Image (spheres, rainbow, N blue to C red):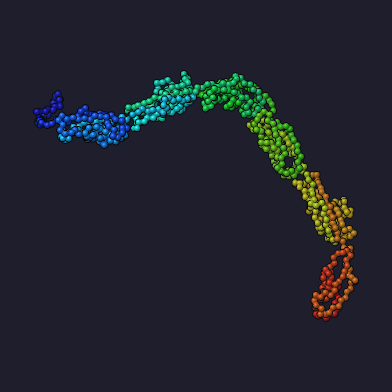
């Protein structure tokens, strides 16, 4: 028969015709599927060898052999390696895990009569994988959480972190995201982080005019899959609401001195806040301030208040033009908004002394050689209207400023330079010690300390109480026979000394005329010949040493001079003529004569040959013993008599 095809155009139709011939052959009936195509669902975490819940069956009217089943392919391509089909029963099983698959797979299957292998029928099995097996589960068994916040907590303040766990094995089914149920009252004051479950403040709850003490939030945890599953948790947020602080009275009165120390509290304003039971809450943290009430002067230039309510001067109160001041003290908490309470304060300022010395002066007398450093006194002042540290300083002039130090902290006065270092050599000095408050130097007092100086405190001192010298009576005029020595420990000219011989207490009375002492060196010398007074063998006279201080001081030492007098000369015994006979060949060195002499003064005697003729060559005499001996061979001389003097 012919088959025609046309493009069906109304105005100008185009068509084509083809002839079809069908030849009918008598064959057997092929197999056929029962309830095909097939669909099945399996969990994504199914174990290997698990059976896919699907009934794959084929039939054949005139079955010649056995029906066999097989997998010919699928989508994706890896399906053939993931599933097995029993060739006899058609049971489909899992041959490996499904973690690499997404949502579904299509398995191409075939059935054939093994007696007629050319009669093959085809079908598909669409397998859907159940990926989302369980919903997120909150970590608390009851899914109920509680937290607390302050009503002043700012946006972004963390409230609580809630958590849920999704046990699904694959993403995104095992991912948990969070959202806030916005249908509940007060939910607009909070946010939840969709990834972390952190609940935070969206806006301060102090703005909520209803001021509830508790907010109930519903947090939904779900996975972001195409077929999401979810759970809901309840979060109860308690709010610490702010309560205003309260001062303990409405009026405060104080009377203070105009020398009240700067920064020293004189009045304590007490306040309480019930929120202070929670030390970490800003609602319970109080701050104090003061404000003017009908004062021409800004009260804050005179008074301040610290963070515990203590009122104090911020400057010196001396020389104020007004004595009574009234102002308001305000206590505020740190809540948002801050809550306050106020009270009036009246302060009366009276004039009184501040820092004082008692006594206000002192006097000392010190030696010029006073050892330094030397402590003098502690000039301690009394701080009558303050408790801040007092400081001290030396406000003297000239040498007193340099010679004395005043300890800044203790007021100790110490001499640090010797009086001898003063080129003017003053006999007295005046130190003025100033004491003042460390935080208000205008509050001060002064003390006068006078130091009188003894410029010549010590007399000169001889090294020995007496001196003894021995000289011969023929000691040359002007020759030094000894030296006296004295010292003076005083400084400067007071330590300069001179020596002299006193004309009194001499023995004999005129001893001083025979001797002289050098006024600077102390050397004693002969000033008159001792031969003029051959009857005196011992002279005693005082030597005086005098310093140059004011007044001058002296010391005396006795000087004794023993004179060696030679009253008698030596005498040859028995007379002054001697004769001796010797052989002409007497040996050199032979002692030939011992001259015997006497000395009535018992003085040592010395001998010498006084002639200068040739005979001196043949004889010599010992200057100590007076023994004459042969000095040269007599054979050399033709003389037989040798006179020797």
At 67% from the left and 38% from the top, the residue drawn is 407
Q: Nearer the viewer, residue 68 or 218?
A: 68
Q: Is residue 205 above or below residue 97?
A: above
Where the C terminus falls, by quadrant?
bottom right
Across and down, in percent, residue 516 comes to: 83, 55
Q: Residue at x 73, y 33 (%)?
A: 360
Q: Name the image quarter holding residue 477.
A: bottom right
Residue 276 location (% of width, % of height): 54, 24
Q: Is residue 423 visible in this depiction of the protein?
A: no
In the drawing, does residue 559 fall left or right of residue 61? right
Q: Position of residue 503 (x, y in %)?
A: 87, 51
Question: Residue 446 or 630: which is nearer the viewer?
Answer: 630
The residue nearer to you, when weighing 222 against 62, is: 62
- Is 273 left, or right, of 542 in this rendering? left
**Above or below, 187 relative to 524:** above
- Residue in the image at 85% along x and 80% along y: 640
């Amino acid at each position: 028969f012919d088959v025609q095809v046309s493009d069906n155009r109304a105005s100008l139709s185009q068509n084509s015709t083809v002839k079809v011939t069908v030849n009918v052959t008598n064959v057997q009936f092929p197999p056929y599927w029962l309830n095909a195509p097939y669909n099945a669902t399996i969990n994504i975490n199914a174990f290997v060898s698990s059976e896919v819940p699907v009934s794959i069956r084929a039939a054949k009217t005139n079955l010649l052999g056995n029906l066999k089943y097989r997998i010919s392919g699928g989508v994706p391509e890896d399906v053939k390696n993931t599933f097995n089909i029993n060739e006899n029963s058609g049971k489909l099983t899992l041959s490996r895990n499904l973690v690499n698959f997404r949502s579904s797979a299509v398995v191409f299957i075939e059935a054939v009569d093994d007696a007629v292998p050319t009669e093959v029928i085809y079908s598909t099995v669409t397998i859907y994988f159940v990926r989302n097996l369980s919903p997120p589960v909150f970590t608390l068994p009851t899914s109920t959480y509680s937290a607390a916040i302050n009503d002043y907590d700012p946006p972004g303040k963390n409230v609580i972190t809630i958590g849920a766990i999704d046990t699904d094995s694959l993403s995104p089914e095992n991912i948990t995201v969070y959202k806030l149920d916005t249908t509940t009252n007060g939910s607009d004051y909070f946010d939840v982080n969709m990834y972390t479950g952190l609940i935070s403040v969206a806006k301060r709850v102090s703005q909520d005019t209803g001021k509830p003490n508790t907010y109930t939030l519903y947090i939904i945890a779900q996975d972001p899959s195409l077929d999401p599953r979810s759970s809901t948790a309840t979060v109860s947020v308690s709010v610490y609401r702010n309560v205003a602080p309260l001062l303990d009275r409405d009026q405060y009165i104080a009377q203070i001195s105009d020398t009240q120390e700067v920064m020293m509290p004189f009045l304590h304003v007490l306040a309480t806040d019930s929120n202070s039971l929670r030390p970490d809450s800003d609602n319970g943290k109080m701050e104090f301030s003061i404000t003017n009430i009908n004062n021409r002067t800004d009260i804050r230039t005179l008074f301040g208040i610290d963070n515990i309510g203590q009122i104090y001067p911020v400057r010196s109160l001396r020389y104020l033009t007004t004595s009574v001041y009234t102002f308001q003290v305000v206590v505020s908490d740190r809540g948002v908004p801050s809550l306050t309470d106020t009270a009036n304060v009246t302060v009366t300022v009276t004039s009184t002394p501040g820092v004082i010395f008692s006594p206000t002066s002192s006097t000392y007398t010190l030696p010029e050689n006073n050892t330094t450093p030397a402590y003098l006194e502690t000039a301690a002042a009394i701080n009558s209207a303050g408790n801040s540290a007092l400081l001290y300083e030396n406000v003297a002039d000239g040498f007193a400023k340099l010679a004395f130090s005043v300890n800044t902290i203790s007021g100790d006065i110490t001499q640090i330079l010797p009086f001898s270092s003063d080129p003017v050599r003053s006999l007295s000095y005046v130190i003025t010690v100033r004491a003042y408050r460390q935080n208000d130097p205008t509050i001060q007092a002064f003390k006068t300390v006078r130091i009188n100086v003894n410029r010549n405190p010590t007399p000169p001192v001889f090294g020995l109480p007496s001196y003894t010298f021995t000289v011969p009576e023929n000691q040359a005029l002007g020759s030094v026979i000894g030296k006296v020595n004295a010292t003076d420990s005083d400084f400067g000219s007071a330590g300069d000394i001179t020596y002299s011989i006193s004309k009194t207490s001499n023995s004999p009375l005129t001893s001083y005329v025979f001797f002289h002492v050098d006024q600077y060196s102390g050397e004693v010398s002969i000033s008159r010949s001792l031969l003029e007074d051959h009857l005196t063998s011992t002279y005693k006279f005082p030597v005086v040493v005098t310093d140059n201080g004011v007044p001058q001081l002296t010391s005396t030492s006795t000087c004794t001079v023993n004179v060696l007098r030679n009253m008698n000369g030596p005498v040859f015994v028995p007379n002054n003529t001697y004769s001796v006979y010797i052989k002409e060949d007497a040996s050199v060195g032979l002692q030939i004569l011992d001259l015997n002499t006497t000395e009535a003064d018992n003085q040592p005697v010395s001998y010498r040959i006084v002639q200068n003729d040739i005979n001196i060559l043949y004889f010599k005499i010992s200057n100590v013993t007076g023994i004459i001996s042969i000095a040269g061979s007599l054979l050399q001389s033709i003389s037989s008599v040798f006179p020797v003097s």
